[in-house]
Amino acid sequence: MSRALLQLAAALLSVAPTTAQTYSLRGYLVDGLTNRPITGARIHLFSVNGGNPIGSNGPAATPVVSDESGRFAFTALPAGGYAVQAELAREVVFYEEDAHFLLARTVSVGPQFESREITIRILPPGELTGALRDESGEIVPESGIAAYRRGRRGARIELIPAGNSRVDEHGRYRVTGLRPGDYTVCAVPPERHERYLVPMAESTAAFVASGGTRVYTQACESGIHVASGEGRQIDLILRSSESVTVRSSAPAELFRDDGVSLVPERQPEIVQSPTLRYDFPETVPGHYMLESRLGDGGPGPYQVARRRVVVSNEPVQDFEIRPERGARIDVSTRRDDGIAAQKDDVTVEWLTGGERLQANRRWPDPVFMLDPGAYWLAFRARASGCAVSATLGGSDVLRGPITLLPGMTARLEIVWSTLCGSVRVHGAMNDQATSFATYLLLLSGTPQEPGDALIGTLDVHGDATIGQLPPGRYRLWTWMNDANGYVGPDLAVAPFDTVEVTSGRTASITVTPGARL
């Protein structure tokens, strides 16, 4: 072959398409009552990329069967989000990772999670039943209940939506398929606020002379434990209260500020006057968040305001809210070896500490438009490597927190490296391996104000490897799960182990998983 032909062949090879890198998802199927492996069960995998309903795109891989140790494995998977389903004799069970409520059934697959193994714990579900009536014992049509489970969202323990039910013609409700744990149950009035009005024939409460009407109000009961395979009966009462008109100076939405409501309580009615006002008539007294957004529909500037308000028994309450510009953060990524970073070498998420902030909103890359407030950063590598540096306006924000001010414009500069470390964890108690214990490695923040965290499970031998970590000192918590729905300790008060990670090395640590706190 001539030299020219050899050069042509080399050129063709240099531009030949490369095979996309693939990854694996491995885990165990375990009886949550006995902590013993479940063998011979079929495991299904579905892609959840694109926001479509789970299973709408068909299976993402051929089903696999758990072996004698309960272990299963899917290989040759593109990086992304997946849902895992265990097919049992009488039911199918999705793996639910304690995470953001919208992503509870999503398992991340990619280089940063290649060494992680998940555990699907099978427990007989519990249920909640009961009656919901008004103060006179009458049925309230189209009312219902909402159940919230005390669960873990990453490093934080919060109330997570778990189920809801409308009442039937007898005023009874039923919520099934509940994971064992501690719940808050709320009585919810009919959705349409016109039907919140209390008819005279259904209540001993009379209309009042001040002009306010009596309306039904949401009431919650906390500290309800649902055991595995058992039911609890909780009867609730929809109570009536004199209504209030809440008036806002800007278009806004009204949220209940009770730590569990995730959707607006009310939309405003526009009142034409010399100064335009926005009214929420027939509002129940209580604690609320007024939230206003203007121009939040594209990559350009928008305005936002949030104000906590206490609605008392005054007939009309007028609140001034002044929307301020959101923050614009431009993100740039570079590698520490001088090679140009690819667009998705590192993806960035903005974590919040419980405020109803708009996070994870990503307009055309690499620009974020975010609400003012406090955040922590979460980095997820889509290729082998880790984020070793992150600066915002010259300040180190790799492990947060970050405060974004109204109208702020800044550049977030991320340095990505392949010189990462890892941690090998072994759990043991009384010289016995602690199979399927849970670990939590805090990546940013403090135990009192935690940010990002990696959560996983020790395998049947009590081992786990946590890879692709930037060098540094980390706090590690481990605990044993139980059939009562224990979600792990409050990091602020629970003891932890400390491990030092260095570049290119694997640190080893032996831990004794803690008991329920």
Image: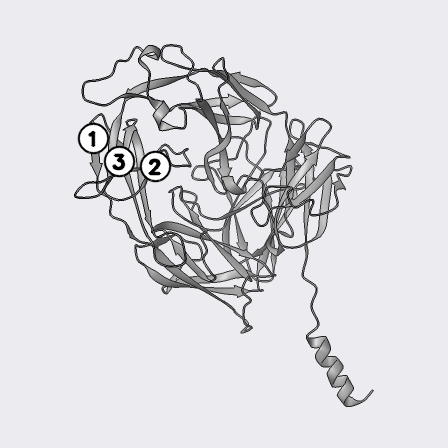
Q: Which mark is residue 241?
A: none
* Residue 351 to residue 165: above or below: below
The amino acid type, in three-letter code, at marker 2 is: Gln
**Residue that badge 1 annotates:** 316
Instruction: Give the colouring mode of the picture.
Output: one colour
> Along the polypeptide, which appears first: circle 1 or circle 3?
3
Label 3 SS: strand
Residues under numbered marks 1 and 3 in contact, where contact means CB atoms less than 8 Å apart = no
Residues under numbered marks 2 and 3 in contact, where contact means CB atoms less than 8 Å apart = no
Q: Nearer the viewer, mark 1 or mark 3?
A: 3
Looking at the rendered image, the quarter that the N terminus falls into is: bottom right
The amino acid type, in three-letter code, at marker 1 is: Val
**Residue that badge 3 annotates:** 279
Of residues 487 and 212, the one drawn nearer to the viewer in this rendering: 212
The amino acid type, in three-letter code, at marker 3 is: Asp
The furthest residue to the right: 1
